Image: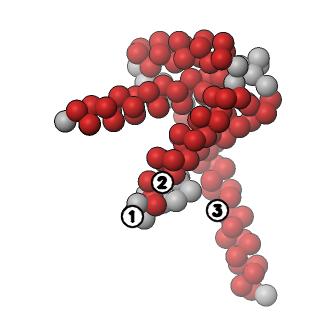
Amino acid sequence: MAIFAAWKQQARQLKLETYAIYLAYRDPRVPWYARLFAAGVVAYAFSPIDLIPDPIPILGYLDDLVLVPLGLALALKMIPPEIMAECRQKAQTRLSEGQPTHWIAAGVIIAVWLFLAALTIIGLFNIFQN
C-alpha cells in the first residue's frame, strides 16, 4: 500500500508542476523560447489525444510516463527559478481552492488536433488518388 501512496503523491506533485509551468509560460518575464516550449509541453500534457494511444500495451503509457515528465524537466530548466517559485505558490493556492478548469485552452487543443487530423486525411487522400 505504501507504493500506491508514493505514486499518488508523485501524481499530485506532477499536477502541481504542470499547473505551475502553465502559469509561468503566461508570465512576460519568461524568455520567449521557454514560453513557447512550456506552452507546448502543457498543451500536450492536458491534451486528450496522445502521441501513442493508451490502448497500445506498454507503449500507450510511455508518453505519459516519460515524455511529459521529460518535457516538464526541460521547461523547468528554461524558466528562471524565482519565477517558478512564484508560480508554484500560485498553483498550490489555486489547486487547494479547487481544480481550475480551462475550457478555452481545452477547445484550442482539440481544434489543433482536429486540424492536424484533417490535414493528414487530405494528404493521404491526395497520395492515394495519384
Residue 117 is tagged as 3
State the CA–CA distance, disc 1 to disc 3: 23 Å
Query: At which x and y percent is residue 78?
Result: 71, 29
Is 19 on the left or on the right of 10, as rendered? right
Is 4 on the left or on the right of 59, as rendered? left
State the CA–CA distance, disc 2 to disc 3: 22 Å
Image: 17 above or below 96: below
- Neighbor class of circle 1 (other Cα within 10 Å; few <14, some 14-19, many 20+) is few
Residue 57 is tagged as 1
Query: At which x and y percent is residue 32?
Result: 80, 29
State the CA–CA distance, disc 1 to disc 2: 10 Å
> How is this picture coloured?
secondary structure
Residue at disc 2, secondary structure: helix
Q: Nearer the viewer, residue 27 or 82?
A: 82
Name, please, the residue furthest toward the bottom: 130
* Labelled pair 1, 3 in contact (Cβ < 8 Å): no
Residue 23 is tagged as none
Earlier sequence position, callout 2 versus callout 3: 2
Q: Nearer the viewer, residue 5 or 117?
A: 5
Locate the N terminus and report the quarter of the image it occupies. top left
Earlier sequence position, callout 1 versus callout 2: 1
Image: 92 above or below 65: above
Q: Residue at x 59, y 14 (%)?
A: 85
Residue 62 is tagged as 2
Image: 72 above or below 54: above
Query: At which x and y percent is residue 77?
Result: 67, 29
- Neighbor class of circle 3 (other Cα within 10 Å; few <14, some 14-19, many 20+) is few
Q: Is residue 21 visible?
A: yes
Locate the C terminus and report the quarter of the image it occupies. bottom right
Q: Amino acid at mark 3?
A: Ala
Q: Nearer the viewer, residue 14 or 98?
A: 14
Q: Amino acid at mark 1?
A: Pro
